[in-house]
Amino acid sequence: MFGTDYPITKHSDALELIRKLDVEEQDKEKILGQNAARVFGL
């Protein structure tokens, strides 16, 4: 699940870090929203 230490870390910096991860695109999508949607029933 995606989260930041805002205001210490900017959201844009955290998103850039996730986009650079050496994981499959499907896993990045889970990190950036699909996991939260599943957990919270959205």
Image: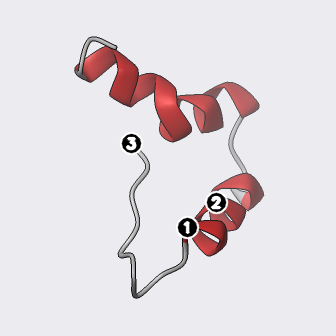
Residue drawn at the location 72% of the way across and 34% of the way down: 24
Q: Nearer the viewer, residue 8 or 30?
A: 8
Q: Position of residue 23 (x, y in %)?
A: 68, 43
Q: Amino acid at mark 1?
A: His
Q: Are marks 3 and 2 in contact (CB under 8 Å)?
A: no
Is residue 14 toward the left or the right of residue 25 in the image? left
Q: Position of residue 14 (x, y in %)?
A: 57, 67
Q: Secondary structure at mark 1?
A: helix
Nearer to us of marks 1 and 2 is 1
Residue count near mark 3 (Cα–Cα under 10 Å), binned few <14, some 14–19, many ≥20: few
The residue carrying mark 2 is 15
Q: In the rendered view of the protein, which quadrant contains the N terminus? A: top left
Q: Secondary structure at mark 2?
A: helix
Q: Are marks 1 and 2 in contact (CB under 8 Å)?
A: yes
Q: Nearer the viewer, residue 7 or 28?
A: 7
- The residue lying furthest to the bottom in this view is 8
**With respect to residue 32, does 39 lie above or below?**
above
Q: Are marks 3 and 1 in contact (CB under 8 Å)?
A: no
Nearer to us of marks 3 and 1 is 1
Q: Amino acid at mark 2?
A: Leu
The residue carrying mark 1 is 11
Which mark, by number, is residue 1?
3
Residue drawn at the location 63% of the way across and 38% of the way down: 28
Residue 40's image quarter?
A: top left
Q: Amino acid at mark 3?
A: Met
Q: In the rendered view of the protein, which quadrant contains the C terminus? A: top left
Is residue 36 toward the left or the right of residue 34 in the image? left
- How far is mark 3 from mark 2, CA to CA? 12 Å
